[in-house]
Amino acid sequence: MKTIINCETGEILERALNAKELKQQVADETEADSVKAAAQAQAEAKEAARKVILDRIGLTAEEAALLLG
Amino acid sequence: MAAGLGFKTFVNGDVLTAGDTNGYLMQGVLVFASAAARDSAITSPQEGQFAYLKDTDVTTYYSGSAWTAIGGASGGMTLIQETVASANSGIDFNSIPGTYKQLLLVWSGINHSAVDNTFVLRANSNSSNDYSQRFFYATGSNTVVYGIQDSNSFGPATFGTDVRDTAIMYSSLGSVLIDNYASSSKYKTFFSNYAYNDSGTNYFQYVLQGSFDSQTAITTLNIVRTAGAGTISNEANTSIRLYGIA
């Protein structure tokens, strides 16, 4: 349900989303999922790259943090 | 509409002519309950005609092409509508009068009913990437990020993402100022700042400027859910207010 406020008359109407709004909602949700998945993939790729470097130099994440801190 | 003749004191026995009626009696301010009542009663407004609207306490005049609120030249802010969100999946402010120079939407105390929800602000239900903007935002880790993008809303997550803490200072609060919103030929510059705290205890503080790249006059502002299946509500003693700035 969405609330529609008529700014000229003050009338308030509650109604279900129409077909166009429902279609837009699905598109918005799909885009949101896509953005979230891309961010997740980026974070995982960064973590994997970090792990490769740590393995190469033989340090744990905690030891590396201690050095950089 | 006939030219006004000024003021005349009628005395007993005077003959009321058509000229008197048009020149004196038709020059007054007509009083209506609202703009809708005015428009219903005056279907062919005449340039120079005046109408007082009781619901908003605004006096308007007809310029020849539109009803215009008096006071525009001297400035001033008028509360157009105030609402309290209560488990809403979306809110539209429609039929926004085109009689102001700027619109200001102000809110505080907005919370979401569930995680993974995002609510944004759009105009005229326009979901294209017509909102060009640049912004700074800071998070709870004190990282400040600069962003520039063509977005499909006034700022990313205008009303927050995952806003679940009921404390007012952690809820969504902010404002959006839209300039020249009634123009049907120019793009609309906007300025906004807003903040919220997500359920992961990250704090987001946005400061942004942008341009709504649409020549269409804004007559509707839409609070839209773009992710999740939840609703928004105002905490006690908070609201969403739409002002017109003359």
Image (tube, coloured by chain):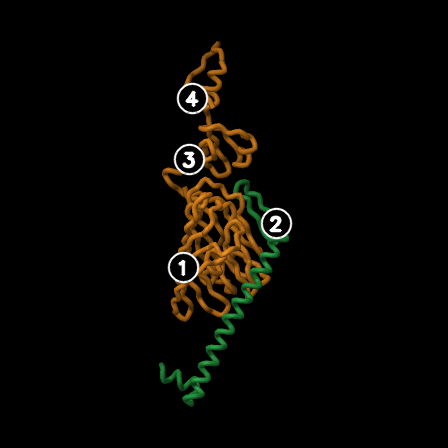
Chain colours: A green, B orange
Which disc is residue B134 wearing?
Answer: 1
Residue B113 appears anywhere in the view: no
Task: Compare marks 3 and 1 and give the one earlier in the sequence.
Answer: 3
Residue identified by numbered label 3: B70
User: Percent position (x, y) of residue A6?
Assistant: 55, 44
Looking at the picture, do discs 2 and 1 lie on one chain? no
Q: How crowded is mark 4: few (under 14 residues within 10 Å), some or many (20 or more)?
A: some
Q: How would you rate the neighbour count of disc 2 (Cα within 10 Å): few for under 14, some for 14-19, many for 20 or more?
A: few
Q: How far apart are marks 3 and 2 (CA)?
A: 33 Å
| Residue at mark 1: chain | B
x%, y% of residue A12? 58, 46
Q: Are the residues tagged 2 and 1 within 8 Å (C-beta)? A: no
Tag 3: residue type? Ile
Residue named by callout 2: A14
Q: In this view, does A59 lie to the left or right of A40?
A: left
Label 3: chain? B
**Quadrant of res B208:** bottom left
- Amino acid at pointer 2: Glu
Residues marked 4 and 1 touching at CB (< 8 Å): no
